[in-house]
Image (spheres, coloured by chain):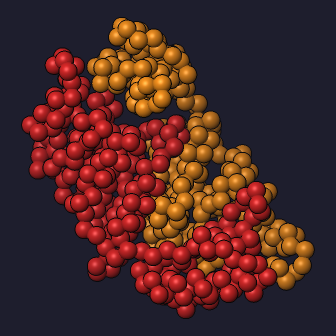
Chain colours: A red, B orange
Amino acid sequence: MQESGTITAAILVIGDEILSGRTQDTNTSHIARFLGTIGIDLRECRVVPDVEDEIVAALNALRVRYTYVFTTGGIGPTHDDITADAVAKAFGVGIGYHPEAMALMAARYKKPEDFNDMRKRMARIPDTATLIKNSVSAAPGFQIGNVFVMAGVPMVMKAMLEELSSRLERGAIMHVATVEAHLPEGQIAAALAKIQSGHKTASVGSYPFYREDGPGTQLVVRGRNMAEVEAAACEIEVAVRSEGVEPRRI
Amino acid sequence: MQESGTITAAILVIGDEILSGRTQDTNTSHIARFLGTIGIDLRECRVVPDVEDEIVAALNALRVRYTYVFTTGGIGPTHDDITADAVAKAFGVGIGYHPEAMALMAARYKKPEDFNDMRKRMARIPDTATLIKNSVSAAPGFQIGNVFVMAGVPMVMKAMLEELSSRLERGAIMHVATVEAHLPEGQIAAALAKIQSGHKTASVGSYPFYREDGPGTQLVVRGRNMAEVEAAACEIEVAVRSEGVEPRRI
């Protein structure tokens, strides 16, 4: 599965609020785009509820399979925030109050009584984990092995992702060329299949859209060999023109 | 895992475009909310790439575990649309041109030559499957066993979901009460934990927000026993008021 030299990742979103439809997840696409900029291939995402066994099972399935796993959600101060305990269980390690996490958090509260027992829960970190600092609201995330545990609140998650990025091995960048055409994809599908089979190192995707300026298709070429991506994109432009439509690079 | 009488579901999103961050998935939250309205519990989501083995493995893991599985994506006319073949493989059945699907699609094209070979790919349906009609763009989805295979384009997916909804067994509706408070969640977390432990049939979730009118927390009670949901929500309102803040039901 894992090509040598390819750095892969999975995302594990933890939270009943995504599964109930209450919250629209946007963390996945943010992390996906970020990983793309540093050459890491996102291969899988899962969303599980705030249920310990589910978190443990999903995390253990993903962490042996991919270079990195990024989790979001479930590290706040309330009773339903059980991610840290679940991660400790998945790794078979203990969990306890982390001195540096306690210090970081204590510094945030002006009155000592505001750093209450529930907030102290956020300083409980699995043994052997290292902290991921949180420039927004102090309570840290953490890294254990190849797993990065982040908050679910998008603003906090973004800050943590930036903070941890220097720890990630980077891969060869994926080059992307996008050709937009006001053509139904079925009209150009045969040409696309031929172009795909002529450029094995690139992947050609076809994504129809329905917009006010009319329906059409975005044709996206992705690959690590820039010359091949560009060659495939040029062939797509030729194929679109041969249908009497002017393509647009976007 | 599966309580007797509870109807459960998983979503399998198929598509490189979600994993690359190119496309923000919104189908999941739409399906999640829809399932909520008919009393079906969404328990898990997965996103996998356009890779046959990945689709087969994920589908086979999910379909034995949940009452229903809904897939989105990968049923268009292009070479990267491989969902129908992968689903046939997962079920160990053959696949071929479905006469009714061919007829539905042929009726859509004015010129017979427009119903080309690539478009005909969309009429390839696994053996034993039944069609899910597509009022937007003709090419149907299908149901096989407890799996519903839908398009990825949101407008088409929504039409298919509406079309298939009469086939779903309905569960007891989940009641939801939401209390919003301009309080950090850490200030009310201890009270929430107590309220949760007093109402075992309901689940109490806490979701912080950062908005222009100031930060705060949405406290969400969900459960099938309306009286218990309401009782827990009232206790939350009392707890918020005791912190000197006026709660708001939303």
The relative height of residue B231 versus residue A208 in the rendered view (above or below) is: above
x%, y% of residue A100? 11, 39
Left or right of A64 in this view: B184:
right
The relative height of residue B44 versus residue A181 in the rendered view (above or below) is: above
x%, y% of residue B123? 73, 73
Q: Residue at x 43, y 61 (%)?
A: A33
- Front position in the image: B125 or A153: A153
Please, which residue is most extreme toward the bottom here? A198
Q: Quadrant where the N terminus of chain B lies?
A: top left
Q: Is there any visible trace of residue A99 in the rendered image? A: yes
Please, which residue is most extreme toward the left here? A99
Q: Is there any visible trace of residue A89 in the rendered image? A: no
The relative height of residue B97 versus residue B136 in the rendered view (above or below) is: below
Mark count: 0
x%, y% of residue A194? 62, 89
Q: Residue at x 70, y 54 (%)?
A: B155
Q: Residue at x 26, y 42 (%)?
A: A134
x%, y% of residue A183? 75, 73
Left or right of A236 in this view: A53:
left
- Front position in the image: A44 or A143: A143
The relative height of residue A62 versus residue A143 in the rendered view (above or below) is: below
Q: Residue at x 73, y 58 (%)?
A: A211
- Residue A139 falls in image quadrant: top left
- Front position in the image: A188 or B65: A188
Please, which residue is most extreme toward the right here? B110
Q: Quadrant where the C terminus of chain B lies?
A: top right
- Residue A151 falls in image quadrant: top left
